[in-house]
Image (cartoon, grey):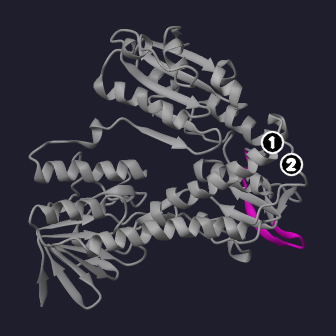
Amino acid sequence: MQERFDSIVVGTGQSGPSLAQRLAQAGQRVAVVERDRFGGTCVNYGCIPTKTLVASARVARQVQRAAEYGILLEGPVRVDLGRVQARKDEIVRASNEGVEKWLRGTEGVEVVRGHARLAGEGRVRVGERVLSAERIFLNVGTRPFRPELDGIDSVPTLTNEDMLRLTELPRHLVIVGGSYIGIEFGQMFRRFGSEVTIVERGDRILAREDPEVSAAVQTILEAEGVRVLTEAECLALAPHADGIALGLDCAQDAPAVVGSHVLLAVGRTPNTDDLGLEEAGVERNDRGHVVVDDELETSVPGIWALGDCNGRGAFTHTSYNDFEIVAANLLDGERRKVTDRIPCYALFLDPPLARAGMNDREARASGRRVLVGHRRMKHVGRAKEMGETQGFMRFLVDGETQELLGATILGVGGDEVIHALIDVMYARAPYTVVSRAVHIHPTVSELVPTTLQDLEPLE
């Protein structure tokens, strides 16, 4: 016997719970299916726990640098990783339990525990129960990707989720992957006291970014004692008397990096392989992401995919925007689209890297006449006062329309400063709105107008 609902939401990541609430407020009876922890990746394994650890690592670094500011402390800095993790767990638990309490307390929403599989037109099977609805929304997220490396089954390895459970510091943490997750954990555990080596197959870390960004981030890491190895084309793992050996070269008897722990940080894969998508006719791409149109509907009418599983953003903020798009289109009579979204994200290195819109490579490829403003953080008064002078800010402008095309800020406060530029980009206002604005002194933001007043052609 089928249990009838108006809508079924599978997964409780960033978009699912908010959508369930909006649907219920519109008078619908909604089933929310969750097989694991409420809140999805961000709450349990991503943003909230990792940024909590980043905050602890920053405090450790500030204490280590205390003498630079004239503050004298006795003895070496010691980090109790167990207490660091306990603080993180408390914050995560509050968020996790908060999501569950919110859903269970929402009138019109029924929480169903278990693994969901599509079971034909408008139906979802959860254990022995069969739920049916006119609309189905998938918000199932992603999980760490396990690469095919020689010897991977012969040694213990860690994912980013495993790192959140460590209570003793690794003696030497070897990280496979020089992208966002690997860099955040690398700096974090170096500040906690581990020896850290980051190994990247490509010719530079952060291959998605412009070369100047990659080089600057590597300089920041190396200044703190993180070892960065690139062009490691032939990775292989093997047991070693001192822990785990990671071979970097295909040549026989080539040198290897030996660590006590190995973190695999080479991307994530969507949780779409056991949902019955193929039987239901829902199309996936070659990376496993659910294929969606500009309004996030799948190849099967009446089924939508939101959040990381659709491959259209892979960030908490884009997942939430997916909810906003679907809710506006279904409930408010609007026609919002994913392609209206301006790409923006941050790497929570310290100092952070914040990005919005185009980078240099994309701007050149656009065929526009592009102007660029560039300023190093060592020339920003507030950064000098704080002793945080690494990095730079860089802004791209369309020379014909005067619209802001892109912004990169690698530096203290950059993850907050960049929003002033994002707002102007959404307004499609000329860059002069910012360049002629008066900003407060002394701040990092006050140098944004100044930088935009000194534009040159992008070479």
The magenta segment is 231-244
- Tags 1 and 2 touching, CB below 8 Å: yes
Residue 32 visible to an observer of this rendering: yes
Label 1, label 2: how far apart the Cα atoms are: 7 Å
Disc 1, SS: helix
Quadrant in the rendering for residue 19: bottom left
How would you rate the neighbour count of disc 2 (Cα within 10 Å): few for under 14, some for 14-19, many for 20 or more? few
Quadrant in the rendering for residue 413: top right
What mark, if any, has residue 66 been given in the picture? 1
On screen, residue 408 versus residue 250, left or right, reads left
Give the labeled residue for mark 2: 73
Residue 159 visible to an observer of this rendering: no
Q: Is residue 209 magenta?
A: no
Q: Position of residue 385 (x, y in %)?
A: 70, 26
Nearer to me, 71 or 47: 71
Q: Amino acid at mark 1?
A: Ala
Q: Amino acid at mark 2?
A: Leu
Ranked by sequence position, the earlier of labels 1 and 2 is: 1
